Image (tube, grey):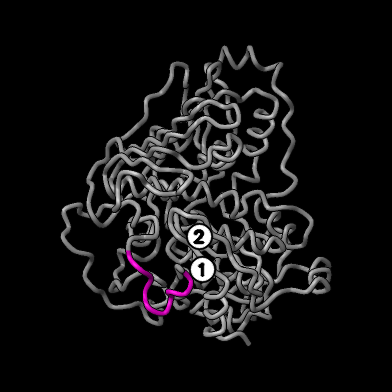
Amino acid sequence: MTTRRDFLKTMGAGIATFALGGTHRLAAAPSPVMMTSRETAEAKKEKVKIAFIGIGNRGEQDVADFVRTGMIEVTALCDVDLDGRQCQKVLNMFPGAKRYRDFRELFEKGSNDFEAVVAAVPDHIHFPVAMMALAHGKHIYLEKPMVRTFHEAELLMAMARRHPELATQVGNQGHSEANYFQFKTWFEAGIIKDVTAVTAHMNNSRRWHGFDPNMKHLPAAEPLPQGMDWDTWLGASQWHDYSSKYHQGEWRSWYDFGMGALGDWGAHILDTVHEFLNLGLPYEVTLLNQKAHNDFFYPYSSTILFRFAARDGMPPVDITWYDGLDNLPPLPPGYGGSQYNANIPSTNQGETPRAKLNPGKIIYTRDLIFKGGSHGSTLSIIPEEKAREMKDRLPEVPKSPSNHQKNFLLACMGQEKTRSPFEINGVLSQVFCLGVIAQRLNTKLFFDTRTKQFTNNAFANALLAGGLPPRKGWEELYKLK
């Protein structure tokens, strides 16, 4: 059995020099648990043995989606709040699965029971779960956003490169749906070309809180739910007393735990734009405006400008992000109505009213304007008369050979490559991290994409690694040498 001490020693040896603003690599230290080629071959003949970490709310939906593939065997379930009402449905579905509250114990004691992990946990726990999974030789499906800090993305991408035999997939489902294949096909055919600007918008009521922006301190302590492992829930974050204002999805609103609307929805709206236009990292990030700026939680609304340089013969691109109920972007002539994407997963916590403008994007090129939604919804050319003119020139778009969950499982079996691996999604996640820093500091930032440092703000550079050191007992995962 691999002990926690053994794991930390391995991680300390495995993570080589990482200096913010410099280069880094991981040393070739062996992982504590690795599948042999014979074990891998045998796994191809059977269902993939899965451990689920986080089984309530979004986790419950992930379980259902993976079960629907008919390709998994659920061997372990892990959640810090196993006694919570939100966990009972999944627990009852798999009475024979081993149960854990602490994911570190899952890896230490149950590592031989599974070969892949599906994690639907708060954003601040994404990094330690994924790093431990890769260190223990496990394939990992991780809900988006991939990480909470720029630094965490650097380390996870490096760790994934060190383990090409392990499948990694970030849960932006649109990367396996119609939008992905349409964008790829239209881009390769030259229909989408010379993109100069993108408007991305998320203006419905889902995910918005009602916290007081004039608060002077964090929420007061409340009694813990029975049986909840709050210490593990906090992970590497500095100590916070338990509050219901952090639990059941509310963590997404707080800088210390979540990534706000940008991290939550950006991956569903901007993923194909970022990948196929090869945008990389922006050289400028400007907080144009925001409502209710404060020290603790994300603003009620915000507008963020990301500027990307010219690359590979393509022109510079400006992406402007709009979020908030009262912060609608300007719409081009001929935009038409705002279609709702029925494939957007529900929250399991009640539905919210549809917005005047549903989540999506507008892509401006030198010749055409494209209108799109979120997740897997496809693009259309606007205005309608231009779409009719282009109709006979549009290439046929292939259908997806596998949905996002099946794609991951087939990758675990060595039969496909994942479409949203850490190496691809990690850079997009870093873009969102830079945007969050601009939100927190309420300013314009200039970023050197070569050194990966801000050039005009020392406080912003400190926030690349989260601003505060990890809590005692978690520091080896983030060790800087």
Task: Name the residue type under label 2.
Answer: Arg
x, y percent for residue 77: 57, 75
* Left or right of residue 288: residue 182: right
Q: Main secondary structure of the magenta part?
A: loop
x, y percent for residue 50: 66, 70
User: Residue 54 shows which numbered tag?
Assistant: 1
Residue at image location 40% in from the left, 43% down from the top: 447
Which of the two residues, 294 or 213, is positioned nearer the viewer here? Answer: 294
Which of the two residues, 222 or 352, is positioned nearer the viewer here? Answer: 222
- On screen, residue 264 above or below 341: below
x, y percent for residue 443: 27, 42
Callout 1: SS: loop
Q: Are marks 1 and 2 in contact (CB under 8 Å)?
A: yes
Span highlighted in magenta in the image: 468-478
Q: CA distance from mark 1 to mark 2?
A: 8 Å
Please check the rendered image and state whether residue 97 is part of the magenta-colored stretch, yes or no.
no
Local packing at callout 1 (Cα closer than 10 Å; few below 14, some 14-19, many 20+) is many
| Quarter holding residue 167 | bottom right
Residue 130 appears in the figure: yes
* Left or right of residue 43: residue 224: left
x, y percent for residue 459: 29, 53
Name the residue beneath numbered marker 2.
58
Callout 2: SS: helix
| Quarter holding residue 305 | top left
User: Residue 477 shows which numbered tag?
Assistant: none
Local packing at callout 2 (Cα closer than 10 Å; few below 14, some 14-19, many 20+) is many
Residue 61 appears in the figure: no
| Quarter holding residue 19 | bottom left
Q: Where is the N terminus found, in terms of image quarters? A: bottom right
Task: Name the residue type under label 1.
Answer: Gly
Please check the rendered image and state whether residue 470 is part of the magenta-colored stretch, yes or no.
yes
